[in-house]
Image (cartoon, rainbow, N blue to C red):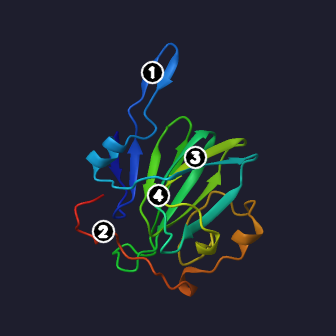
């Protein structure tokens, strides 16, 4: 697995080694040993699978508050998405900055988000299936988010009027969110 720097400390784009032949392909979707070798110490406890029937569905920008914060490993197995991560760690030099990447069944890229990032994605194709691993279970009382089109974030979503849940329409702007997140481990601790 190859780690591609994103410019946001701790946020890592991962390119798996894919073995192809006339039958198709094989890859390791996740390997604890490979993650350890890359300096990613998350221990995942839950896998989630989301399906979107049409293009233009936006989910996000979501996160869980401490002490239930989650690191995530996300990827697409069918279709494609415009994937977005926003740094919410108040002691990070990239606080409030975002990273965007297209994840697809074709490119097989994965994005690792440490705790303290908001996450969202917009489907770019119908019948998109999105998978993710988290290192803490879902806790409804800790469920939170930031408004997807907050002008302060400046995210260039490829769809101006996406399909949204009622909850995602009502999320606060970054300026109205008092972040409890800090870098874990502190920056400079030798981890991705």
Q: Residue furthest top?
A: 22
- Tag 4 residue: 135
How would you rate the neighbour count of disc 4 (Cα within 10 Å): few for under 14, some for 14-19, many for 20 or more? some
Q: Kindly state the secondary structure of the residue where label 1 is placed.
A: strand
**Position of residue 146 measured from the top left corner of the image (x, y, whole percent):** 59, 74
Q: CA distance from mark 1 to mark 4?
A: 30 Å
Q: In this rendering, does residue 145 appear at all?
A: no
Name which of mark 2 and mark 3 comes first in the sequence: 3
Residue at 48% across, 74% down: 67
Q: CA distance from mark 1 to mark 2?
A: 37 Å
- Tag 1 residue: 20
- Tag 2 residue: 185
**Position of residue 56 measured from the top left corner of the image (x, y, whole percent):** 71, 53
The image quarter containing residue 164 is: bottom right
Name which of mark 1 and mark 2 comes first in the sequence: 1
The image quarter containing residue 94 is: bottom left
Q: CA distance from mark 3 to mark 1?
A: 22 Å
Q: Kindly state the secondary structure of the residue where label 4 is placed.
A: loop
Do tag 1 and tag 4 residues touch (Cβ < 8 Å)? no
Residue at 69% across, 63% down: 160
Q: CA distance from mark 3 to mark 4?
A: 14 Å
Q: Nearer the viewer, residue 32 or 82?
A: 32
Name which of mark 3 and mark 1 comes first in the sequence: 1
Q: Nearer the viewer, mark 3 or mark 1?
A: 3
- Quarter of the rendering occupied by the C terminus: bottom left
Position of residue 74 relative to residue 28, above or below, is below
**Position of residue 121 measured from the top left corner of the image (x, y, whole percent):** 60, 57
- Tag 3 residue: 131
| Numbered label tally | 4
Position of residue 176 relative to residue 65, above or below, is below
Name which of mark 1 and mark 4 comes first in the sequence: 1
Q: Nearer the viewer, residue 186 or 53?
A: 186
């Amino acid at each position: 697995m190859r780690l591609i720097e994103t410019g946001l400390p701790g946020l890592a784009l991962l390119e798996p080694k894919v073995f192809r032949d006339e039958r198709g392909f094989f890859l390791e979707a996740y390997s604890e040993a490979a993650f350890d070798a890359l300096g990613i110490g998350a221990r995942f406890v839950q896998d989630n699978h989301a399906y979107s029937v049409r293009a233009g569905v936006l989910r996000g920008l979501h996160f869980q508050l401490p002490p239930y914060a989650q690191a995530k490993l996300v990827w697409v197995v069918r279709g494609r998405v415009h994937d977005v991560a926003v740094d919410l760690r108040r002691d990070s030099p990239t606080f409030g900055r975002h990273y965007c990447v297209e994840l697809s069944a074709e490119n097989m890229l994965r994005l690792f988000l440490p705790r303290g990032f908001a996450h969202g994605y917009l489907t770019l194709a119908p019948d998109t299936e999105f998978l993710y691993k988290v290192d803490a279970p879902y806790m409804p009382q800790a469920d939170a988010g930031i408004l997807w089109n907050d002008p302060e974030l400046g995210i260039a979503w490829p769809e101006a009027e996406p399909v949204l849940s009622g909850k995602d329409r009502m999320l606060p702007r970054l300026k109205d969110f008092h972040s409890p997140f800090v870098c874990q481990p502190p920056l400079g601790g030798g981890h991705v």
